[in-house]
Image: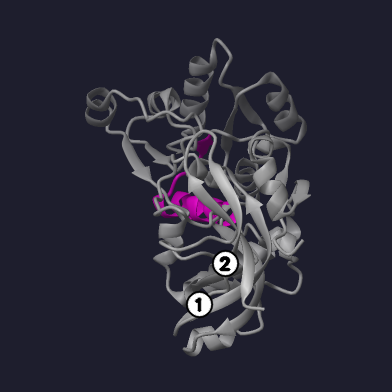
Amino acid sequence: MNMMQAVVLETQSDNPLFSLQEKPIPVPRKGQLLVKVEVAPLNPADVMFARGRYIQEKSLPVVPGMVASGTVLASGGGVIANLMLGKRVCCTGLRNGDGPWSQYLLTNATLCLPLSKQMSFESGCNLLANPTTAWGLMEHVKRGGHRALVQNASAGELGLLIRTLAKSRKIPLINIVRSKQQTEALLNSGEKYVLDSTDLHFDDHLAELCVRLNATISFDAVAGEQSSQLLTAMPEGSELVLYGRLSDQDMKIDGLDLLAGRGQRITGFSVMRWFEGLSFIRKMLVMNSIQTFLAKHSTLNIQRRINLASLIENFSEYSSNTTKGKTLIYPQM
């Protein structure tokens, strides 16, 4: 049993070319682990990578996917790696290596964190993506002393996590969605401030709320024209944190007016860079906090469960309508 099945991305494009291949099961070196992948999510970042539009680049062909959950089967040696042997973990692949859309994953021991007894493989497969992103962004709010914030793409899974965290920390949050249906859904869920970006008076309503609540930071997952709308609406000296490009457009702003004239700031956030910059002890503490929080505030909504072959055959369908729930991949099926 020295071979495994894996999805291989051959070409990045609007219609990416995948193949299902038999590949040798990798052997871990010192400090590395071999993980039997149980569940991997299909996230918007995975779709962007497959289409060649993600911030992280890798040489092709490559096994895609970014995060997963599974069981550590082998250690290449080293204190941390040996401690992980046999553990149920959430993990991410090597920065320049294959991802987890395969039956087995080779990764560094420092990129694997144990799952708590209460956390299933399904609940834990995405921990190093959306939950950690939400946690890292909210830590940025805390460090900056911001008292209210704005986020777009509020109807998605990550938006729900940020909404839940903000509510638990009693931080006023202005939510931006892109339809009347999403507006009604968020208002019915208990959100107080929800704006539809397609509304004719969206800019005026956003500016009024930002000033009234003193919202001095925004999380921008959309980019394009909405970056300028956010910066213009917030008080002078506010900060925009760019972490996505769901509009598939580059940020469009008047730098002289907004940055020089109004003293606005733009920063970027990459969850993997943020997480990799933490010490291993800090990673453990953050992950324990996230798992404890999710045990009380579950946000998992599964739309479908698929295997590797189905992922290739139906990628176009599965990569759309992500707000309806998560698509989970089971490589062992």
- Residue range corresponding to the magenta coloring: 130-151
Instruction: Name the spot of residue 257 as percent of width and height, x first.
Output: 25, 23
Instruction: Name the spot of residue 288 as percent of width and height, x first.
Output: 61, 70
Q: Magenta segment, principal secondary structure?
A: helix
Residue type at mark 2 is Lys
Q: Earlier in the sequence, mark 1 or mark 2?
A: 2
- Assign the C terminus to one quadrant of the image: bottom right
**Element type at mark 1:** helix
Left or right, 328 with reference to 44: right
Residue density around tag 2, few if under 14, some if 14–19, many if 20 or more, within 10 Å: some
Instruction: Locate residue 181: give its quadrant.
Output: top right
Residue beneath label 1, please?
109
Q: What distance separates the C-alpha of mark 1 from that of mark 2? A: 22 Å
> Which residue is depicted at the point 48% across and 74% down?
110
Residue beneath label 2, please?
23
> Which residue is depicted at the point 54% across and 12% down?
201
Question: In this picture, is 215 found above or below 280?
Answer: above
Instruction: Name the spot of residue 188 as percent of width and height, x first.
Output: 77, 31
Is residue 141 visible in the rendered image? The answer is yes
> Which residue is depicted at the point 49% across and 89% down?
77
Left or right, 266 with reference to 312: left
Q: Pick the residue in front: 222 or 248.
A: 248
Is residue 147 visible in the rendered image? The answer is no
Left or right, 268 with reference to 246: left
Residue type at mark 1 is Ala
Q: Pick the residue in front: 126 or 107.
A: 107
**Element type at mark 2:** strand
Instruction: Locate residue 331: give its quadrant.
Output: bottom right
